[in-house]
Amino acid sequence: MAKAIMIQGTMSNVGKSLIAAGLCRIFRQDGYRTVPFKSQNMALNSYITEEGLEMGRAQVMQAEAAGIKPSVLMNPILLKPHSDTGSQVIVNGEVLGHMNARDYFKFKKQLIPDIMKAYNTLAAENDIIVLEGAGSPAEINLKTDDIVNMGMASMAKAPVLLAGDIDRGGVFAQLIGTVDLLEKDERAMVKGLIINKFRGDKTILDPGVLMLEERSRIPVVGVLPYMNVKLEDEDSLSSRLEKPAGRFTGNGVSQIDIAVIRFPRLSNFTDFDTFENIPGVSLRYVKRPEEMRNPDLIILPGTKNTMGDLKWMRESGMEACVLKKAAEGTLIFGICGGYQMLGMKISDPEGVEEGGTMRGLELLPAETIFEGQKTRTRVRGRFSDSLPGSFSALSGERIEGYEIHMGKTLMSEGLCPAAVLEDERTGETKNDGICSGNVCGTYVHGVFDTAEAARGLLKSVAAKKGIDLEDAAVSDYSEFKESQYDLLAKTLREHLDMEAVYRILEEGV
């Protein structure tokens, strides 16, 4: 059976996912068959496996770091919030149903057999499992029947490395307070502390590290710097959503400005990561009309609740803003739920979301009808040849990605589909999306991860703007991520005591 080590944090967004990914890369580089595992993930960024099953993207990122294909075994439970108090519950990649928080809290212990079956299957096939916790293990109200932090560590017999975030301040209180709130048997499983996101001269921090070790009686195994790596974040806590703009050219002005609508239930914002790494391209997230300014391209992304977020568009004034920009000729692109909004109307006869019928933005001649069956599949193909209108530079460019949505979108006859795709599960060839004038939409997540598609979109924008982007440094996103995983591993090796980590791994609990 595999040896295990677990990364937990003092709170959300301390860097657990990246530390776990870095360890996955290091162990792989050192010759071990390594696999990530998170028993329960709550996120709106999800992924579809080759089998058509749904899992959280954080474990996909960690699987890529380990050099293996993602599997739902790595994330047997996925919670996708659809309101402040309720979530869609996905078990082993399949939708179990919708539950409010109180009902799920009572129910979750029944999922332990599913968790342990997935874990034991991975443990039988690998040398090392890198587990990740969720939030904090010291949340008093959530500790009963815990299945993701110390409860999972106990079931897996995994020693724990506890990470705190010094960038937001109070890291010593975070770490000591968390340890003090643990039960005696839980404290015994914490074998090392990590201070993450440190900036500055480490020698100034040394007295605090010594005090931390004396007070907690747990060694500090690493002080990790604020890492300049560009990899996927797990959820909407991502700091990138708060940035007013992305990378700029040397003269301080971006050549291309892309605005992504920040829906309240925004999902799969990783679709746009590739544009954050292209010089001269500014990518920013907007949630108020006054933030829109004059972008060259507006993207309506995926959402967990299309009708709810369309209602928000109307109430916030974002709908009027987008329609005004579209009328002025600004390029508009919709993905999944954003694509559904661009149509004439959305019907929900089965009450999948909000029920009834809503008028869409009426920018594409199409109608979406929600159905109870969720589409989950991987696809590959190309944008249609000779696309009409402003997106002609996308014509024929290669696409790889996945679909995950409720409902079907029917377009008017005689229109050019945006793409022709092959369903990797069934082998079926199908049309997808619509391009009409300066508006285009598709159901494919990851549609711009290929260098060809990303370059084609930027050429379309550049042509509309009257500039030349022939020399734009656009690379395949998968190749770029490989370089980032290696950089992450290199940084961890320099600042983490890997001898201590291997010793903790070997000794267990």
Image (cartoon, rainbow, N blue to C red):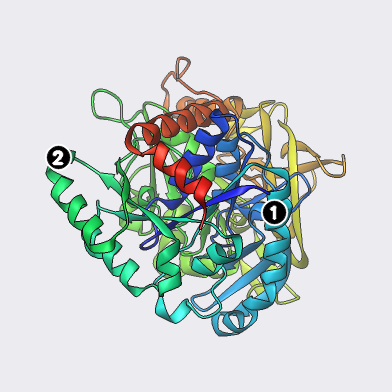
Q: Which mark is residue 73?
A: 1
Residue at the extreme top of the image, as rendered: 471
Q: Is residue 411 visible?
A: no
Q: Which mark is residue 398?
A: none
Please, what secondary structure does the residue beneath circle 2 have? Answer: helix
Q: Is residue 291 left or right of residue 318?
A: left
Q: Residue at x 42, y 65 (%)?
A: 188
Residue in front for this viewpoint, 13 or 192: 192
Q: Is residue 503 left or right of residue 352?
A: left
Q: Position of residue 385 (x, y in %)?
A: 72, 27
Give the residue type that dot 2 points to: Thr
Q: Nearer the viewer, mark 1 or mark 2?
A: 2
Residue receiving disc 2: 203
Residue in front for this viewpoint, 208 or 392: 208
Please rate how many residues cluster around mark 2, counting C-alpha atoms within 10 Å: few if below 14, some from 14 to 19, many from 20. Answer: few
Q: Residue at x 40, y 61 (%)?
A: 12
Please rate how many residues cluster around mark 1, counting C-alpha atoms within 10 Å: few if below 14, some from 14 to 19, many from 20. Answer: many
Q: Quadrant of residue 68?
A: top right
